[in-house]
Image (tube, rainbow, N blue to C red):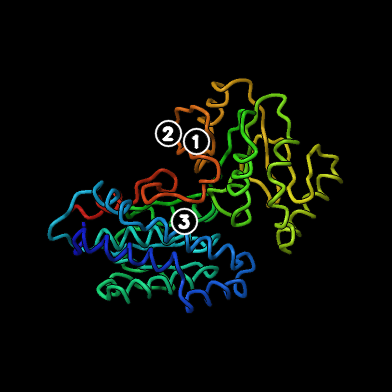
Amino acid sequence: MSKFNKTVLINTFSELGTQLSAPNEQLTEIINNERHYNAWFTPESVLQAVNAVGKMLNPADLNIWLNMYPVQQDKNSKRIGLILAGNLPLVGFHDVLCVLVSGNHALIKASSQDTRLIKHVLDMLCVIDNNFAAQYSFVDRLENFDAVIATGSNNTSRYFEYYFGKVPHIIRKNRNSVALLTGAETPEQLNALGHDIFDYYGLGCRNVSKLLVPEGYDFNFFFESIESFNLIINHHKYNNNYDYNKSIYLVNSDKHFDNGFLLLKEDDRLALPLAVLYYGYYKDLASAQTLLEADSDKIQCIVSTAPLTLKTQVVDFGMSQQPALWDYADGVDTMFFLIKVDRP
């Protein structure tokens, strides 16, 4: 799988995980300063992202993950172009990790929204084991690549298909996440759901953008349970979105619920404006599952404790922003893709 044996990979990346879980002074300074380059990257959000990567890189999970794939002898390193998203801090790290672990060379085109942090984390990796320094390059333009992994919007994906369609590729589009409620949730569970909705200000594909609720659902209980997240309204960009969308709904006389920091609106769509949460009703669990299956190509993950039988990843309340190493974006196994690229 790599020019490094499994033990080296586990030791190196688990050490990186340990350092990310307890940031030193230099990393803390970067965490605190990211907001000057991207207003959404508050110290709290950046620290959460750094800690999430640190938690992901634990020895037990690294061992499980690496054992999922065959070891390749005398492999020829491929040049893998990576176009990283910048909506969340370190959102592209997992793609970089997969390329490094698979023994390939990562040509990294970082987002202008998130360049400093990913560069620093890879610098930290090279301090642990400088052999990885030869396995990646930051580039302004992708050239001389053997395969591409590109993450963007539905619009940019058309350009990606045009430019990279002739080489092996993974091209990701917009996705959102959904929470399926049964009405039997506890206040603690709904409060945990607040993290799935509000962490990173709702900017990620793993953020819940829609609720599926049983007919007659009482939203007052939901609002009471997430009240502790009301300080989000103090972020000026979030507040601007809240005020703007509230004004639109009032002018258009659109029916909606409002708790002072979140707007709830019934809508069939998944993608929504910031500070808004769409919702839809279902009659029974079977009909809810049918709705989710119909939108499976648009859903990143589902937050619920209901007994669902779906191919889409289902996670517990509060866990949508804590993916494991094998929780691949869009359900596409990046490591398996890289192994196929490696084959002659």
Residue corresponding to mark 3: 151
Mark 2 Cα-neighbour bin, 10 Å: few <14, some 14–19, many ≥20: few
Circle 2 sits on which residue? 311
Contact, mark 1 vs mark 2 (Cβ under 8 Å): yes
Q: Number of marks in the image?
A: 3
Nearer to me, 156 or 24? 24
Q: CA distance from mark 1 to mark 3?
A: 18 Å
Q: Residue at x 16, y 55 (%)?
A: 72
Which of discs 3 and 2 lies nearer the camera? The answer is 2
Q: Which residue is mark 1?
A: 296
Q: Position of residue 309 (x, y in %)?
A: 45, 27
Q: Quadrant of the N terminus?
A: bottom left
Q: Is residue 182 left or right of residue 294?
A: right
Q: Is residue 114 above or below residue 275?
A: below
Q: Quadrant of residue 255?
A: top right
Which label was assigned to residue 41?
none
Instruction: Give the residue drawn at x 33%, y 66%.
Output: 15
- SS for callout 3: strand
Crowd rating for badge 1 (residues with CA inside 10 Å; few <14, some 14–19, many 20+): some
Rate crowding at label 3 as few (under 14), some (14 to 19) or many (20 or more) other CA atoms within 10 Å: many
Distance from Cα at disc 3 to Cα at disc 2: 21 Å
